[in-house]
Amino acid sequence: MQIFRSLDSIPSSLRGGATTIGNFDGVHLGHARLVERLIACAARVGGPAVVFTFDPHPVRILRPEEAPAPLTWTDRKAELLADLGVDAVIAYPTDAAFLRWGPNEFFDRVVRDALDARALVEGPNFHFGRDRQGDVELLQKLCRETGILCEIVEPVFVDGQVVSSSRVRKLVAAGQVEEASRLLTRPYCIRGRIVHGAGRGAQLGYPTANLSEVATLLPGQGIYAGRARLEGLCRPAAVSLGPNPTFGEGALKVEAHLLDFCGDLYDRWIEVDFLARLRDIVRFRSVEELLAAMQQDVALTREKVQQMGKC
């Protein structure tokens, strides 16, 4: 999947198709429904299916103090959208000048000039242009005037509630990663760079990869069954997210013990899927109690990954 970051770099092969515009944070089931209709509309007009998204989220420019932690980074977002079948992702570099475009200017410069879109697919709460002045009613009017097919897709409901990025974010923050995964197209994932830690895990027989520079939302504190991926390698991983009270450490850390792996991982980037929350972070009375719990964590992690199928 190629990611385009400029309206001037869009090749002619991506013009004249169907487009959907939005943040697509997390790429959840509601987004998947939009993409399903996007692909159908692209086939109807005989062109590509293109997603136009923003990097960063406009709120991070307009009201940074209110900006929520993202659920995905741009490359993963594009990967998830590619899995759903889109032809290209445009991750437009959001800046103050871009956010000053009014809705009509946005429509003309993005939809008509850059993409020459013949179809637009959006949700009922779509807004566009400066201060979110443009809404679905205006979008439909502009599309009628320019002969562009416009389809408004109703939201997806799970357990009687709308699937949304904010709903996913609340579940992840609470550590309810299995519930969050039911709303996502793939399990919740973070990415970080592996750095040196205290080395205590290795001393106990459970070496860990210590993650830093995680730019997305961290799940709530706890021990998790997970799956680690880096440079073609995929291994089950028991993940600790929180402090280490047994040894009097209060700093929050993200540590992943890769099952059946031995090797040097320092300074490499790793992705970790969160499959299930196993237990709370607790202070054990002895190292022996801690080791017994870690042994059980590893066994449960192996079992969970096996249930999920391939790593």
Image (cartoon, rainbow, N blue to C red):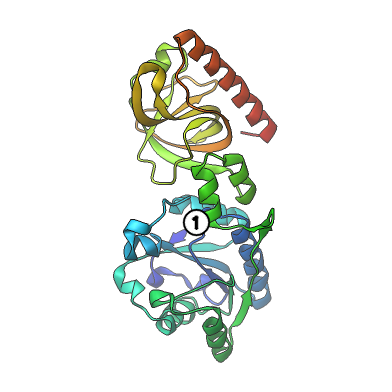
Q: Residue furthest left?
A: 97
Q: Is residue 309 visible?
A: no
Q: Amino acid at mark 1?
A: Asp
Give the structural element (helix, strand or loop) at label 1. loop
Q: How many marks?
A: 1
Picture residue at 46% right of the left edge, 81% below the top: 107
The x, y position of residue 84, in whole percent, is 62, 56
The x, y position of residue 16, in whole percent, is 55, 77
When asked about the image quadrant of residue 102, the answer is bottom left
Q: Nearer the viewer, residue 183 or 196?
A: 183
Q: Nearer the viewer, residue 112 or 57?
A: 57
Picture residue at 36% right of the left edge, 65% below the top: 94
Q: Is residue 21 left or right of residue 307?
A: left
Q: Is residue 175 above or below residue 104?
A: above
Q: Is residue 133 left or right of residue 60?
A: right
Q: Is residue 251 visible?
A: yes
The x, y position of residue 9, in whole percent, is 40, 69
Binning the other alpha carbons within 10 Å of mark 1 as few (below 14), some (14 to 19) or many (20 upward) gives many
Residue at image mark 1: 25
Q: Residue furthest bottom?
A: 145
The x, y position of residue 260, in whole percent, is 55, 20
- Quarter of the picture holding the C terminus: top right
